[in-house]
Amino acid sequence: MQIRVIAVGRIKEKYLQDGIAEYEKRLRPYAKVQIVEIAEEKRPASATPSVERIALEKEGDRILAAIPEGSFLIALDVKGLSWSSEELAASFREWELSGQNQLAFVIGGDLGLSMTVIARSDLRLSLSKMTFTHPMARLLLVEQVYRAFRIMRGEPYHK
């Protein structure tokens, strides 16, 4: 299975970079994982709503351009479905059995995701009702993907 994580912005915190790298390494036996960072659209701190809307659309265009043809697109969205780790694993199993071997997860920036990205998504998924930073969401996502593969294969999960 090929999994692409498309995320707006770079991760500056070393501890998050290290955590993500660890889960990418753990995922190698299960899937080919690629993380694609999309540039945040620059805007003034006191940007007007119209400037923010334009920035969000530009980020959305870059996100859409990074989605491989034929991918099943999962948008991380606070308004999305809230699944357990077991439900995520069951979905991975279904995708695998149906021949859907290209997944793309999308994590927006501080403005969220544009309506064009939401409209293109095949699934909207929420990591939690709690609020996390976008870099933290990236770490949580790769950890949950790893956990899903372990559950799916009936393997123990210790860390």
Image (cartoon, rainbow, N blue to C red):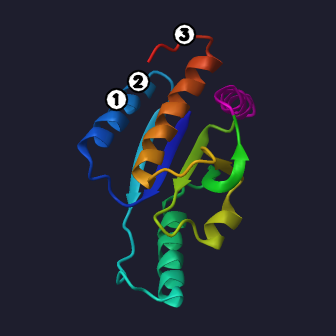
Q: Does residue 101 appear to the left or right of 11 in the view shown?
A: right
Q: Which residues are magenta?
A: 84-98
Q: Which residue is mark 2?
A: 26
**Along the line of sight, the residue nearer the viewer: 149 or 127:** 127
Q: CA–CA distance between discs 3 and 2?
A: 13 Å
**Which residue is the extreme one toward the front?**
130
The amino acid on which the numbered mark 2 sits, given as a three-letter code, is: Arg
Residue 27 image point, x, y percent = 45, 27
Using the image, tell me which numbered label, if any, was put on residue 156. Answer: 3
Q: Nearer the viewer, residue 16 or 62?
A: 16
Residue furthest to the left in view is 14
Three-letter residue code for mark 1: Glu
| Quarter of the image with the C terminus in it | top left
Decide: few, some or many residues near mark 1? Use Cα within 10 Å; few <14, some 14-19, many ≥20. some
Task: Name the side, left or right, on which 79 lies relative to 140.
Answer: right
- Residue type of the residue flagged with mark 3: Pro
Tell me the chief SS of the magenta region: helix
Q: Mark 1 — residue?
A: 22
**Residue nearest the viewer, comparing 145 with 69:** 145
Mark 2 burial class by Cα count in 10 Å: few <14, some 14-19, many 20+: some
Name the residue nearer the viewer: 53 or 150.
53
